């Protein structure tokens, strides 16, 4: 395969996949945020019901600005819901709220993959901050000077990408498990009827696709840099 072909497969296709995943989640969310649940409870109430059913009493549920800014912070034991999901009673709001509550349950029970992700988080933040700079610098130096410095910078970039790739890989089971717990609790606690779960499944399934896309993009970038390093070493 030519250099352009490799670039298309490892960089362009993952990038397009990422754009598709982002469009998919926004489409699924905007559709299901307009469909109200029969029970009429809010996302905050749903999240509270889920965590209380797990015996969790020390997690704060707060409202944050923005759209799809929902997250759970295990360090502060804070479950943050964006305004439409905190106050809304749509299928999308309840699905997202229960998903974040699923993370709180993971934290309580000591879900292994969540612990691994939290351990990797600081290193991943550093890696994300330096990877682009060292990779661009390494490629420029190799292309115009063929220097050892350029090669070494790309090695550092590859290590940074490997950390990012590992983080995204570990994130996949964490997110899938949180969604599984959310769906079980929404039906088990009577928050939603089974026929209402279609909207939840659509919303959470689209959200999961964004995590897959992030992993694919990181893996593609890592393989691309490794191929550059391998080719330079042969030369």
Image (cartoon, rainbow, N blue to C red):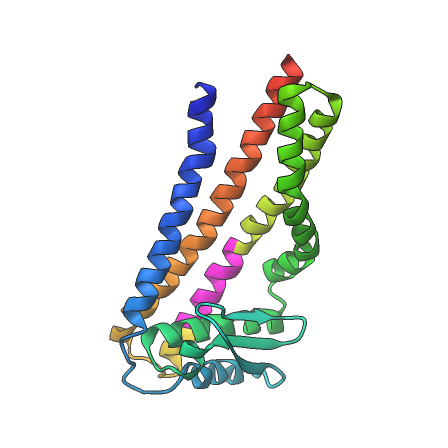
In-front residue for pair 161/107: 161
Q: Is residue 155 covered in magenta?
A: no
Instruction: Please tell me whether residue 182 belongs to the stretch shown in magenta.
Output: yes
Q: Residue at x 39, y 79 (%)?
A: 188
Point out the image quarter for the C terminus.
Answer: top right
The quadrant where residue 13 appears: top left
Q: Nearer the viewer, residue 178 or 10?
A: 10
Above or below, 135 relative to 214? above
Work out which quarter of the rendered image holds the N terminus and state it. top left
| Residue located at (49% from left, 68% from top) | 69
The reply to whether residue 202 is visible in this rendering is no
Relative to 54, is 92 on the left or the right? left
- Residue 83 in the image: state x and y as whole percent: 45, 78
Measuring from the top left, give residue 45's x and y in whole percent. 44, 86
At 43% from the left and 42% from the top, the residue drawn is 15
- Check the image and report above or below for 204 versus 37: above
Residue depicted at x 70% and y 25%:
151
Relative image position of residue 142 (x, y in whole percent): 65, 22
Q: Overall secondary structure of the magenta stretch?
A: helix
In the displayed structure, 62 sits above or below 175; it is below
Left or right of residue 130, residue 55 in this image: left
Task: Tell me if 131 is positioned left or right of 100 in this view.
Answer: right
Residue at the front extreme?
144
Magenta stretch in the rendered image: 172-183
Residue most toward the top?
235
Query: Residue 197 location, x and y as percent?
Result: 30, 71
Quarter of the rendering containing residue 29 = bottom left
């Amino acid at each position: 395969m030519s250099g352009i072909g490799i670039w298309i497969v490892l960089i362009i296709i993952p990038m397009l996949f990422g754009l598709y995943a982002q469009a998919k989640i926004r489409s699924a969310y905007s559709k299901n945020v307009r469909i109200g649940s029969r029970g009429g409870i809010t996302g905050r109430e749903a999240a509270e019901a889920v965590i209380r059913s797990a015996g969790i009493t020390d997690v704060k549920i707060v409202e944050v600005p923005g759209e799809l800014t929902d997250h759970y912070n295990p360090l502060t034991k804070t479950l943050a819901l964006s305004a439409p999901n905190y106050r809304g009673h749509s299928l999308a709001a309840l699905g997202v709220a229960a998903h974040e509550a699923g993370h709180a349950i993971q934290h309580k029970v000591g879900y292994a993959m969540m612990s691994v992700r939290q351990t990797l988080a600081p290193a991943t933040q550093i890696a994300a901050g330096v990877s682009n700079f060292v990779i661009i610098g390494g490629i420029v130096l190799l292309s115009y000077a063929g220097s050892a410095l350029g090669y070494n910078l790309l090695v550092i970039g590859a290590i940074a990408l490997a950390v990012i790739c590992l983080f995204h890989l570990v994130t996949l089971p964490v997110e899938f498990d949180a969604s599984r717990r959310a769906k079980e609790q929404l039906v088990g606690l009577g928050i939603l009827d089974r026929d209402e779960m279609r909207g939840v499944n659509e919303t959470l399934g689209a959200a999961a696709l964004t995590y897959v896309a992030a992993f694919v993009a990181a893996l593609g970038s890592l393989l691309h840099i490794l191929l550059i390093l391998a080719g330079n070493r042969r030369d």
